[in-house]
Amino acid sequence: MKIGDVAEASGLPAKTIRYYEDIGLIRPARGTNGYRDFAASDVHKLAFLARARSLGFSIEECRTLLSLYEDRDRASADVKALAEAHLRRIDRKIAALAGLRGTLAELVARCHGDARPDCPILDDLAGPKPAADA
Amino acid sequence: MKIGDVAEASGLPAKTIRYYEDIGLIRPARGTNGYRDFAASDVHKLAFLARARSLGFSIEECRTLLSLYEDRDRASADVKALAEAHLRRIDRKIAALAGLRGTLAELVARCHGDARPDCPILDDLAGPKPAADA
DNA sequence: TCTTGACCTTCCAGTTACTGGAATTCCTAT
DNA sequence: ATAGGAATTCCAGTAACTGGAAGGTCAAGA
Protein backbone atom coordinates (compact mmCIF):
# COMPACT_ATOMS: atom_id res chain seq x y z
CA MET A 1 0.00 0.00 0.00
CA LYS A 2 1.36 3.40 -0.93
CA ILE A 3 1.36 6.45 1.28
CA GLY A 4 -1.52 8.11 -0.55
CA ASP A 5 -3.80 5.17 0.04
CA VAL A 6 -2.75 4.94 3.66
CA ALA A 7 -3.41 8.64 4.09
CA GLU A 8 -6.91 8.14 2.79
CA ALA A 9 -7.47 5.04 4.90
CA SER A 10 -6.15 6.52 8.15
CA GLY A 11 -7.31 10.07 7.69
CA LEU A 12 -3.79 11.34 8.32
CA PRO A 13 -2.02 13.56 5.77
CA ALA A 14 0.87 11.90 3.94
CA LYS A 15 3.16 14.55 5.43
CA THR A 16 2.18 13.49 8.91
CA ILE A 17 2.73 9.83 8.13
CA ARG A 18 6.24 10.59 6.91
CA TYR A 19 6.78 12.60 10.06
CA TYR A 20 5.64 9.70 12.21
CA GLU A 21 8.16 7.49 10.48
CA ASP A 22 10.84 10.15 11.04
CA ILE A 23 10.28 10.13 14.77
CA GLY A 24 10.13 6.37 14.89
CA LEU A 25 6.44 5.71 15.53
CA ILE A 26 6.20 3.42 12.52
CA ARG A 27 8.66 1.56 10.29
CA PRO A 28 7.06 0.85 6.95
CA ALA A 29 8.94 -1.33 4.47
CA ARG A 30 10.35 0.08 1.25
CA GLY A 31 9.75 -1.08 -2.31
CA THR A 32 12.55 -1.37 -4.87
CA ASN A 33 11.60 2.05 -6.19
CA GLY A 34 12.17 3.62 -2.79
CA TYR A 35 8.47 4.10 -2.13
CA ARG A 36 7.16 3.24 1.30
CA ASP A 37 5.19 0.01 1.28
CA PHE A 38 2.72 -0.11 4.16
CA ALA A 39 1.55 -3.39 5.65
CA ALA A 40 -1.88 -3.75 7.22
CA SER A 41 -0.24 -3.53 10.65
CA ASP A 42 1.24 -0.15 9.73
CA VAL A 43 -2.14 1.14 8.67
CA HIS A 44 -3.61 -0.18 11.90
CA LYS A 45 -0.95 1.57 13.95
CA LEU A 46 -1.57 4.81 12.11
CA ALA A 47 -5.28 4.58 12.79
CA PHE A 48 -4.45 3.95 16.43
CA LEU A 49 -2.22 7.02 16.46
CA ALA A 50 -4.82 9.14 14.72
CA ARG A 51 -7.40 8.20 17.32
CA ALA A 52 -5.05 8.75 20.25
CA ARG A 53 -3.96 12.11 18.89
CA SER A 54 -7.57 13.13 18.36
CA LEU A 55 -8.14 12.44 22.05
CA GLY A 56 -5.38 14.90 22.80
CA PHE A 57 -2.60 12.56 23.84
CA SER A 58 0.84 13.94 23.10
CA ILE A 59 3.14 12.22 20.66
CA GLU A 60 5.22 10.83 23.49
CA GLU A 61 2.11 9.53 25.21
CA CYS A 62 1.09 7.97 21.92
CA ARG A 63 4.44 6.28 21.73
CA THR A 64 3.88 4.83 25.18
CA LEU A 65 0.30 3.84 24.39
CA LEU A 66 1.46 2.11 21.25
CA SER A 67 4.08 0.13 23.12
CA LEU A 68 1.52 -0.79 25.76
CA TYR A 69 -0.83 -1.82 22.99
CA GLU A 70 1.78 -4.11 21.53
CA ASP A 71 2.76 -5.55 24.87
CA ARG A 72 0.54 -8.53 25.47
CA ASP A 73 1.60 -8.56 29.12
CA ARG A 74 0.80 -4.95 29.92
CA ALA A 75 -1.18 -4.05 33.01
CA SER A 76 -4.32 -2.11 32.22
CA ALA A 77 -3.45 -0.01 35.27
CA ASP A 78 -0.58 1.53 33.30
CA VAL A 79 -2.89 2.56 30.51
CA LYS A 80 -5.44 3.88 32.91
CA ALA A 81 -2.86 5.93 34.78
CA LEU A 82 -1.79 7.57 31.54
CA ALA A 83 -5.36 8.32 30.58
CA GLU A 84 -6.17 9.67 34.01
CA ALA A 85 -3.19 12.00 33.94
CA HIS A 86 -4.39 13.24 30.57
CA LEU A 87 -7.89 13.66 31.91
CA ARG A 88 -6.62 15.80 34.75
CA ARG A 89 -4.66 17.89 32.30
CA ILE A 90 -7.78 18.42 30.22
CA ASP A 91 -9.70 19.42 33.32
CA ARG A 92 -7.07 21.97 34.21
CA LYS A 93 -7.17 23.38 30.70
CA ILE A 94 -10.94 23.62 30.72
CA ALA A 95 -10.88 25.34 34.08
CA ALA A 96 -8.27 27.82 32.88
CA LEU A 97 -10.24 28.56 29.73
CA ALA A 98 -13.47 28.91 31.66
CA GLY A 99 -11.75 31.49 33.84
CA LEU A 100 -10.56 33.46 30.85
CA ARG A 101 -13.92 33.16 29.26
CA GLY A 102 -15.64 34.65 32.26
CA THR A 103 -13.37 37.67 32.47
CA LEU A 104 -13.42 38.25 28.75
CA ALA A 105 -17.19 37.87 28.43
CA GLU A 106 -17.71 40.43 31.13
CA LEU A 107 -15.39 42.90 29.44
CA VAL A 108 -17.09 42.34 26.10
CA ALA A 109 -20.49 42.86 27.70
CA ARG A 110 -19.38 46.14 29.20
CA CYS A 111 -18.00 47.51 25.93
CA HIS A 112 -20.63 49.37 23.95
CA GLY A 113 -18.78 48.68 20.72
CA ASP A 114 -19.52 51.77 18.69
CA ALA A 115 -17.47 54.48 17.01
CA ARG A 116 -16.41 56.15 20.25
CA PRO A 117 -12.95 55.46 21.69
CA ASP A 118 -14.08 54.82 25.25
CA CYS A 119 -13.50 51.11 25.93
CA PRO A 120 -13.67 49.07 29.14
CA ILE A 121 -11.67 46.30 27.51
CA LEU A 122 -8.67 48.51 26.92
CA ASP A 123 -9.17 50.08 30.31
CA ASP A 124 -8.90 46.70 31.90
CA LEU A 125 -5.80 45.78 29.94
CA ALA A 126 -4.20 49.09 30.86
CA GLY A 127 -4.52 48.26 34.53
CA PRO A 128 -5.69 50.32 37.52
CA LYS A 129 -5.91 53.98 36.69
CA PRO A 130 -4.29 56.50 39.00
CA ALA A 131 -7.41 57.65 40.81
CA ALA A 132 -7.76 61.41 40.58
CA ASP A 133 -8.42 62.03 44.25
CA ALA A 134 -10.19 65.23 45.07
CA MET B 1 14.90 51.44 34.83
CA LYS B 2 16.85 48.29 34.05
CA ILE B 3 15.40 45.10 32.66
CA GLY B 4 15.56 43.26 35.99
CA ASP B 5 13.48 45.88 37.72
CA VAL B 6 11.01 45.95 34.84
CA ALA B 7 10.75 42.17 34.96
CA GLU B 8 9.87 42.39 38.62
CA ALA B 9 7.42 45.25 38.07
CA SER B 10 5.62 43.69 35.11
CA GLY B 11 5.81 40.08 36.15
CA LEU B 12 7.36 39.16 32.81
CA PRO B 13 10.71 37.33 32.63
CA ALA B 14 13.59 39.44 31.32
CA LYS B 15 13.92 36.97 28.45
CA THR B 16 10.37 37.65 27.41
CA ILE B 17 10.86 41.39 27.57
CA ARG B 18 13.87 41.13 25.26
CA TYR B 19 11.81 38.95 22.99
CA TYR B 20 9.04 41.54 22.91
CA GLU B 21 11.58 44.12 21.87
CA ASP B 22 12.89 41.76 19.22
CA ILE B 23 9.49 41.44 17.61
CA GLY B 24 8.85 45.15 17.87
CA LEU B 25 6.24 45.34 20.61
CA ILE B 26 8.32 47.80 22.60
CA ARG B 27 11.27 50.08 21.90
CA PRO B 28 13.09 50.85 25.10
CA ALA B 29 15.90 53.43 25.01
CA ARG B 30 19.51 52.42 25.52
CA GLY B 31 21.98 53.78 28.03
CA THR B 32 25.58 54.57 27.15
CA ASN B 33 26.58 51.17 28.51
CA GLY B 34 24.28 49.42 26.04
CA TYR B 35 21.78 48.48 28.73
CA ARG B 36 18.10 48.94 27.99
CA ASP B 37 16.67 51.92 29.81
CA PHE B 38 12.92 51.54 30.30
CA ALA B 39 10.65 54.53 30.61
CA ALA B 40 7.41 54.42 32.61
CA SER B 41 5.51 54.12 29.33
CA ASP B 42 7.49 50.99 28.45
CA VAL B 43 6.69 49.42 31.77
CA HIS B 44 3.05 50.33 31.28
CA LYS B 45 3.02 48.73 27.84
CA LEU B 46 4.59 45.58 29.20
CA ALA B 47 1.98 45.36 31.93
CA PHE B 48 -0.66 45.81 29.23
CA LEU B 49 0.90 43.01 27.23
CA ALA B 50 1.18 40.74 30.23
CA ARG B 51 -2.49 41.22 30.99
CA ALA B 52 -3.58 40.72 27.38
CA ARG B 53 -1.45 37.59 27.06
CA SER B 54 -2.86 36.23 30.29
CA LEU B 55 -6.31 36.60 28.77
CA GLY B 56 -5.15 34.41 25.93
CA PHE B 57 -4.76 36.97 23.15
CA SER B 58 -2.09 35.99 20.64
CA ILE B 59 0.99 38.13 20.19
CA GLU B 60 -0.41 39.54 16.95
CA GLU B 61 -3.69 40.37 18.66
CA CYS B 62 -1.71 42.04 21.41
CA ARG B 63 0.08 44.09 18.81
CA THR B 64 -3.27 45.23 17.44
CA LEU B 65 -4.68 45.86 20.90
CA LEU B 66 -1.65 47.93 21.76
CA SER B 67 -2.00 50.04 18.65
CA LEU B 68 -5.70 50.49 19.36
CA TYR B 69 -4.82 51.43 22.90
CA GLU B 70 -2.45 54.10 21.66
CA ASP B 71 -4.86 55.39 19.05
CA ARG B 72 -6.91 58.07 20.75
CA ASP B 73 -9.36 57.96 17.82
CA ARG B 74 -10.01 54.25 17.86
CA ALA B 75 -13.54 52.92 17.72
CA SER B 76 -14.38 50.70 20.68
CA ALA B 77 -16.18 48.51 18.14
CA ASP B 78 -12.80 47.42 16.79
CA VAL B 79 -11.61 46.36 20.19
CA LYS B 80 -14.87 44.60 20.90
CA ALA B 81 -14.73 42.71 17.61
CA LEU B 82 -11.27 41.44 18.44
CA ALA B 83 -12.34 40.37 21.90
CA GLU B 84 -15.47 38.70 20.58
CA ALA B 85 -13.48 36.73 18.04
CA HIS B 86 -11.21 35.60 20.84
CA LEU B 87 -14.20 34.71 22.98
CA ARG B 88 -15.59 32.54 20.22
CA ARG B 89 -12.24 30.84 19.85
CA ILE B 90 -12.17 30.13 23.57
CA ASP B 91 -15.68 28.72 23.36
CA ARG B 92 -14.67 26.44 20.54
CA LYS B 93 -11.66 25.24 22.51
CA ILE B 94 -13.74 24.60 25.59
CA ALA B 95 -16.30 22.69 23.55
CA ALA B 96 -13.59 20.61 21.93
CA LEU B 97 -11.98 19.83 25.27
CA ALA B 98 -15.32 19.01 26.83
CA GLY B 99 -15.90 16.53 24.03
CA LEU B 100 -12.53 14.89 24.60
CA ARG B 101 -13.11 14.89 28.28
CA GLY B 102 -16.39 13.04 27.92
CA THR B 103 -14.96 10.32 25.73
CA LEU B 104 -11.86 9.92 27.81
CA ALA B 105 -13.70 9.88 31.12
CA GLU B 106 -15.93 7.11 29.85
CA LEU B 107 -13.00 5.04 28.73
CA VAL B 108 -11.22 5.57 32.02
CA ALA B 109 -14.35 4.55 33.91
CA ARG B 110 -14.62 1.36 31.92
CA CYS B 111 -11.01 0.34 32.50
CA HIS B 112 -10.62 -1.72 35.65
CA GLY B 113 -7.01 -0.64 35.98
CA ASP B 114 -5.38 -3.68 37.48
CA ALA B 115 -2.56 -6.03 36.55
CA ARG B 116 -4.49 -7.74 33.75
CA PRO B 117 -3.84 -6.71 30.14
CA ASP B 118 -7.49 -6.41 29.12
CA CYS B 119 -8.15 -2.69 28.53
CA PRO B 120 -11.12 -0.85 27.02
CA ILE B 121 -8.98 2.23 26.47
CA LEU B 122 -6.59 0.42 24.17
CA ASP B 123 -9.51 -1.37 22.58
CA ASP B 124 -11.06 1.94 21.71
CA LEU B 125 -7.83 3.32 20.30
CA ALA B 126 -7.35 0.20 18.23
CA GLY B 127 -10.67 0.79 16.51
CA PRO B 128 -13.55 -1.55 15.67
CA LYS B 129 -12.57 -5.15 16.03
CA PRO B 130 -13.35 -7.56 13.21
CA ALA B 131 -16.41 -9.20 14.76
CA ALA B 132 -15.95 -12.94 14.95
CA ASP B 133 -19.28 -13.89 13.48
CA ALA B 134 -20.50 -17.30 14.40
C1' DT C 1 8.04 6.58 -28.21
C1' DC C 2 7.29 10.53 -25.98
C1' DT C 3 4.94 13.28 -22.96
C1' DT C 4 1.81 14.58 -19.50
C1' DG C 5 0.21 14.33 -14.92
C1' DA C 6 -0.29 12.32 -10.66
C1' DC C 7 2.24 10.29 -7.46
C1' DC C 8 6.38 9.47 -4.74
C1' DT C 9 11.03 10.90 -2.65
C1' DT C 10 14.19 14.05 0.34
C1' DC C 11 15.39 18.18 2.58
C1' DC C 12 14.90 22.86 4.33
C1' DA C 13 12.30 26.40 6.39
C1' DG C 14 8.47 28.29 8.97
C1' DT C 15 4.88 28.16 12.49
C1' DT C 16 3.87 30.08 18.33
C1' DA C 17 5.84 32.20 22.08
C1' DC C 18 9.02 31.74 24.37
C1' DT C 19 13.15 29.34 27.18
C1' DG C 20 17.87 27.60 28.13
C1' DG C 21 22.52 28.16 27.75
C1' DA C 22 27.10 29.93 26.27
C1' DA C 23 30.29 33.58 25.85
C1' DT C 24 31.12 38.21 27.00
C1' DT C 25 30.77 42.76 29.20
C1' DC C 26 29.40 45.84 32.98
C1' DC C 27 28.75 47.57 37.56
C1' DT C 28 29.36 47.42 42.49
C1' DA C 29 31.40 46.13 46.64
C1' DT C 30 35.09 44.47 49.30
C1' DA D 1 42.33 43.42 42.28
C1' DT D 2 38.70 40.47 42.35
C1' DA D 3 34.39 38.38 42.96
C1' DG D 4 29.39 38.51 42.37
C1' DG D 5 25.49 39.54 40.18
C1' DA D 6 23.36 41.73 36.25
C1' DA D 7 23.40 43.02 31.70
C1' DT D 8 24.41 41.99 26.62
C1' DT D 9 24.16 38.99 22.16
C1' DC D 10 23.38 34.93 19.60
C1' DC D 11 22.24 30.07 18.80
C1' DA D 12 19.41 26.23 19.56
C1' DG D 13 15.44 23.77 21.13
C1' DT D 14 10.53 23.13 22.27
C1' DA D 15 5.40 20.47 19.81
C1' DA D 16 3.68 18.67 16.00
C1' DC D 17 3.36 19.37 12.12
C1' DT D 18 2.95 22.10 7.33
C1' DG D 19 4.49 24.27 2.97
C1' DG D 20 7.35 24.28 -0.75
C1' DA D 21 11.26 23.23 -3.83
C1' DA D 22 13.75 19.95 -6.66
C1' DG D 23 13.73 15.72 -8.52
C1' DG D 24 12.52 10.39 -9.36
C1' DT D 25 8.58 6.89 -10.83
C1' DC D 26 4.74 5.13 -13.04
C1' DA D 27 0.56 4.42 -15.98
C1' DA D 28 -2.02 6.18 -19.73
C1' DG D 29 -2.80 8.45 -24.03
C1' DA D 30 -1.42 10.60 -28.82
Image (cartoon, coloured by chain):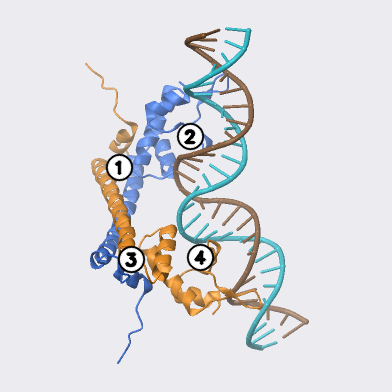
Chain colours: A blue, B orange, C cyan, D brown
* Closer to viewer: mark 1 or mark 4: 4
**Circle 3 sits on which residue?**
B75
Residue B114 - label:
1
- The secondary element bearing badge 1 is classed as loop
Are labels 3 and 2 on one chain?
no
Cα–Cα gap, marks 3 and 1 = 61 Å
- The secondary element bearing badge 4 is classed as helix
For the C terminus of chain B, the quadrant is: top left
In this rendered view, identify the residue nearer to me: A82 or B3.
B3
Q: Position of residue B113 (x, y in %)?
A: 29, 43
At horizontal 33% and vertical 63% (from top left) the residue drawn is B79
**Circle 2 sits on which residue?**
A15
Cα–Cα gap, marks 4 and 2 = 33 Å
Subunit that carries the residue with mark 3: B
Q: Quadrant of residue B70?
A: bottom left
Q: Position of residue D16 (x, y in %)?
A: 44, 43
- Mark 3 Cα-neighbour bin, 10 Å: few <14, some 14–19, many ≥20: some
**Circle 4 sits on which residue?**
B16
* Closer to viewer: mark 3 or mark 2: 3
- Mark 1 Cα-neighbour bin, 10 Å: few <14, some 14–19, many ≥20: some
* Closer to viewer: mark 4 or mark 3: 3
- Mark 4 Cα-neighbour bin, 10 Å: few <14, some 14–19, many ≥20: few
Looking at the image, residue A90 lies above or below residue B83:
above
